[in-house]
Amino acid sequence: LADFPVADMTRIDDRLNDDVKLTMRISSLGRAARAKAGIKVRQPLGKLVVKANSAEEKRALYRLAHEILEEVNVKEVDILESEDGELSDDMPGYSVNSDSGYWVAVKTEITPELLSEGVSREMVRRLQNMRRVANFDVADHIITYYQSAESIKQVVADFNDYIKRETLSREIVDRFPPNGAYAEKHRISGDDILLAVQKAV
C-alpha cells in the first residue's frame, strides 16, 4: 500500500484562501438578507451592496465578485468602504443583514424583467423534478407541454432557449398534453400552470 499523501503547506495560496472565506461570509449574509425579505434564492435581484472593512477587503471582493453574483443571485455588486460613512440597518428598498462588522444589503425591488427570469428558473426546477419522478434518464431528451396564463406564456417565449437547454426539451408546446405524458399542476408566481413531459422519440 502507498503512503497517504501529505499536503505541501507551502503551496497553499493564503491570499486566495482568505478571499474565498470572505466571499463565503458575504454570500451567506446576502442569502440571509434575501430570506429576511422572504425572497427565494431562485428569484434574481438587481443589486447587492456590501461594506468592506479595508481597501484590501474591497480588492478581494472585486476579485471574486462573480462568485457573489452567482451565490446570492444578483445582477450587480456594489462594494463600499468604511470611509463611505455609516450604513443603516434600516435602508429603504433594501433588506439588510450585518454580523461581526460586516454589512450587506440586497435590493428588494423585483422588476418585471427580474420576475420573468425568476418564473423561468422556477419552471426549470419543476420540470427537472418531473423528469426525475417520471424516471427519465439524465440524458433523455423530452417534449414539454404546458397550459397557462398569458403572463407565463410570455415568459416561455422570452426564455425559450434557456428552458429547453436546462431541461433537455426539444420542444415546448402550448397545448394540452397527449396520452402517455407525465403531467402535474403547479402554481408559479400566483398563476396556475399545467406542465407535462414526454420522452422525445
Image: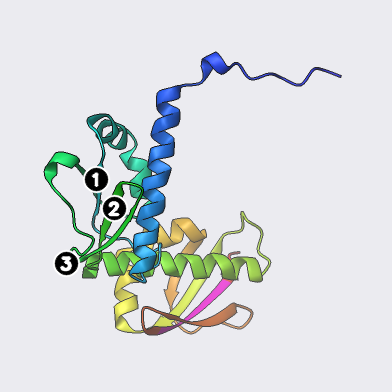
Camera-side residue: 124 or 84? 84
Is 154 magenta? The answer is no
* Residue lying at 20% horizontally and 65% vertically, measured from the top left: 90
Of the numbered discs 1 and 2, the one sitting upstream in the chain is 1
Left or right of 165? Residue 44 is: left
**Residue numbers of the magenta segment:** 192-197
**Along the line of sight, which residue is nearer the eye, 6 or 40?**
6
The label number, if any, that marks residue 166 in the structure image: none
Q: Which residue is mark 2?
A: 104
Q: Residue at x 37, y 53 (%)?
A: 29
Q: Amino acid at mark 3?
A: Pro
Pointer 3 residue: 92
Question: Is tag 3's residue or tag 2's residue first in the polypeptide sequence?
Answer: 3
Q: Is 146 or 90 nearer to us in this picture?
A: 90
**Amino acid type of the residue that numbered disc 2 sits on in the rendered structure:** Val
The way the protein has been coloured in the rendering is rainbow
Relative height, residue 125 to residue 24 (above, below): below
Instruction: Name the disc covering residue 51, or none.
Output: 1
Q: Is residue 196 magenta?
A: yes
